[in-house]
Amino acid sequence: MTSKNILIVDEQKFGKICTALVELNGFDTEWASGCEEGFCQRDFEKYSLVITSYPYSQQFLPRLAGKQVSLLVLSDFACEKLIQVVEENANFFCLVKPVDFASFNHVVSNLIEDKVI
C-alpha cells in the first residue's frame, strides 16, 4: 500500500472539494466517479484510504466490502442500509455531515496511519 494515497470516489463537485481538503494536509489524491466501467475491479490496495459520500455511493458500496482498504463515507443522514454496511465491514467508517474541517482531518489522518478512531 502506498503511504498517504487517497482515492476519492464521488461526483465531480464533491470530489474537487474533498481533494482540496485532504491535499492541504499533504495527502496524494486520485478522483474517480464510481460509475466508470471496471471501477470495482481496480487495485484498491494501492490506496491508504477511499473517501466517498452517501447516498452517492449506495450502488457500489456493497461491492467494496471485502477490499483491503479503509473506507470513509460522508453522509447527509444515517439510515439502516448504510449503518448495516458499515457495521459489517471493520474497515468502513462513516461521518454524518456537516463535518467540521478539524474533525475531518483528524479522522482522515488516523485512518491513514491505521490508528484506532
Image (cartoon, rainbow, N blue to C red):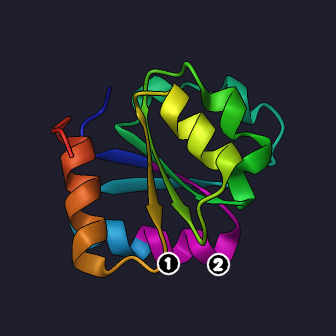
Q: Residues within 10 Å of mark 2 (few under 14, many from 20)?
A: few
Measure the C-alpha gap from mark 2 to mark 1. Answer: 7 Å
Image-based side of 88 in relation to 99, left or right = right
- Which structural element holds mark 1? helix
At x 60%, y 72%, the residue is 76
Disc number at residue 39?
none
Q: Residues within 10 Å of mark 1 (few under 14, many from 20)?
A: few
At x 46%, y 70%, the residue is 18
Highlighted range, magenta: 7-19
At x 70%, y 67%, the residue is 11
Q: Amino acid at mark 2?
A: Lys
Image-based side of 93 in relation to 66, left or right = left
Q: Amino acid at mark 1?
A: Ile
Q: Are marks 2 and 1 in contact (CB under 8 Å)?
A: yes
- Residue 8 part of the magenta-drawn span: yes
Image-based side of 114 in relation to 50, left or right = left
Residue 114 at x, y = what percent?
20, 35
At x 60%, y 25%, the residue is 65
Numbered-mark total: 2
The quadrant where residue 111 appears: top left
Residues 42 and 72: in front is 72
Q: Is residue 26 visible?
A: no
What secondary structure do most residues of the magenta stretch adopt? helix
The quadrant where residue 16 appears: bottom right
Question: Please, is residue 19 above or below residue 70 in the view?
Answer: below
- Which structural element holds mark 2? helix
- Residue labelled with disc 2: 13
Q: Is residue 71 visible?
A: yes
- Residue 99 part of the magenta-drawn span: no
Residue 71 at x, y = what percent?
46, 41
Residues 27 and 62: in front is 62
